[in-house]
Amino acid sequence: MSARMWKALPLAALLAAGAALPSYGAASTLRDAAAARGVYVGAAVANNPLANEAPYRTVLDREFNAVTPENSMKWDATELSRGQFTYANGDAIVSHAQANGQKVRGHTLVWHNQTPSWVQNLGATDLQSAMENHIANVVGHYKGQIYAWDVVNEIFNEDGTFRGSFWYQKLGQNFVAAAFRAARAADPAAKLYINDYNVEGVNSKSTAMYNLVKTLKSQGVPIDGVGFQAHLILGQVPSDLRQNIQRFADLGVDVALTELDIRMQTPSDSGKLSTQRSDYNKVFTACLAVSRCVGITIWGITDKYSWVPDTFPGQGAALPYDENYNAKPAYSGILDALNAGSGTGDTQAPTTPGTPAATGITSSGATLSWTASTDNVGVTGYEVVDAAGTVVGSSAGTSVTLTGLSPSTSYTLRVVARDAAGNRSAASGAVTFTTAPGGGGTGACTATYAVTNSWPNGFQASVTVKNTGTAAMTGWTVTWTFPSGQTITQLWNGTVSQSGAAVSVKNASYNGALAPGASTSFGFTGAQSGTNATPTDVTCS
Ligand code: G3I
């Protein structure tokens, strides 16, 4: 009996059936912790690092009990020329998974991307038969080896209408049911999923998906599950994620989070990594709260290999391991969610950590160190919190280097220890320190604002910052007021805050230092509604 079934049955029923109680314990890897909760934790896998990088395989096999080939089961990888099927890369991932006790999610059969032009150029009748033939071959090749297939992928627009892909334009929405039927015929044991992004919260797109699943089920179309891709943005986990998972589950389908990552503006800093830890924790916690949420797949392992920076320049650091395979705070956020409520009976909190000492104080950062807590089971990490209780940094050990702080600002910070069962210590004594001023020397600098591109409703601009003084600067702040309602949508090489028309941009951690006469620049994209007047009060300090 799986732990997931334990959760579904009342305790009294289990005892009446003579069942032994499950033995839970806080696990030390994601896959063990997930298995104890009756869910899987998966990773998207790419063939090159799988074949060539031992640390990639080590982390994959230690931490994950499911995999999804990131690209190698897509149409352009399996049937680039009509009727000629290639499975070497997909097979390599499947055999690795089988050798390491990992489920395989097949991704994806019918999509508008990564589909060869020969498919896109077919007439309607031929297109439908090519689709059914493709599904029969690919699903047939992997019959019995795939836990679940993403049968159709990304078929909705944001407003809930059908995406006007070549599939929809030529076949109407009937291609969806036909695809599911072909997949069921080719492998009756595989779970069949519809999969999409931006459907994690309750919104127009997820409601369209909900209505389609309901209709397909009422028509007897063999659909077993719904995949929420969950390509999320830092700090933006939908608050109704659990509720949305539950409403799909109530239709009688499984739900999986199929492509989770949580991206941020790069470079990361300790505050962003703490937010990311909490975001990952929230996503896992939401899934675990719904018994038909069967598992979560993360769209990669390490920030070394992620689709995010290629698609969203200036963003990244979206995965639980950094580029050197070090576990990030996100990792413990996941592990804590999986271990929470694991029934260890451990209710004893760690002892209070020592009052932190602050060293290495600059205009944007500081290092805090403290003496360790002890715990009856074991301390799993520490959080640095401000007076409001906001986590500004976290660490597995007894020091953390905080980055992304503001110049000339007083910080009062304390440390809290936690254990694997989620118990938290009392907060330590406080350390108070003030960061160094941002501008050094004479503080003289100029900022030159230039629009470099514009298009209906949008524009791109670049701002060059120059140290015009006689002393080195260690940081800068550029401010201006937008004259015509513009808003910044994405900014790189700086940290922005915008309040109404007022904008303030501080240097990033790596471009604050400017020798006399030296320049640096930052850029951004913005929204505008027809008028894009240049600000007249651009000021550097
Ligand atoms: O294989 C070629 C290589 O030969 C060539 O040298 C290189 C040059 O750019 O490109 C390689 O192909 C790239 C491929 O990934 C394999 O690395 C493509 O350019 C690149 O576009 C492709 O990106 C993939 C993307 O889907 C394409 O749509 C990402 O790896 C993959 O993570 C991403 O995954 C999708 C899911 O399937 C569906 N949901 C969204 C998700 C993120 O976009």
Image: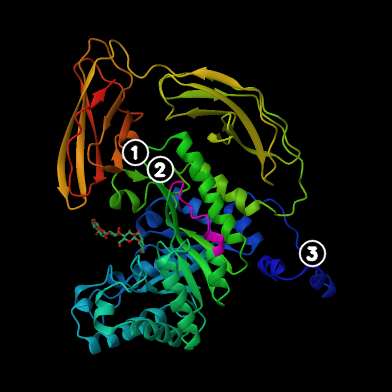
Mark 1 lies on residue: 500
Ligand 1 quadrant? bottom left
Q: Which residue is drawn at the image coordinates 22% and 12% (left, top)?
A: 469
Under 8 Å from ligand 1: the CB of mark 3?
Answer: no
Q: Is residue 73 visible?
A: yes
Q: Position of residue 306 (x, y in %)?
A: 36, 52
Mark 2 lies on residue: 323
| Label 3 vs label 2, nearer the camera | 3
Please say if 34 is above or below 406: below
Q: CA distance from mark 3 to mark 1?
A: 58 Å
Quarter of the figure that contains the C terminus: top left
| Label 1 vs label 2, nearer the camera | 1
Mark 1 lies on a secondary structure that is: loop
Please say if 276 is above or below 285: above
Please report the bounds of the magenta region as a residue range.
Answer: 234-243
- Of residues 483 and 271, the one nearer the viewer is 483
Query: Which label's residue is closer to the chain start, 1 or 2?
Result: 2
Q: CA distance from mark 1 to mark 2?
A: 37 Å
Quarter of the figure that contains the N terminus: bottom right
Please tell me whether the stretch drawn in magenta is mainly helix, strand or loop: loop
Q: Amino acid at mark 2?
A: Glu
Under 8 Å from ligand 1: the CB of mark 2?
Answer: no
Query: Which label's residue is closer to the chain start, 3 or 1?
Result: 3
Using the rendered view, name the quadrant where residue 470 is placed.
top left
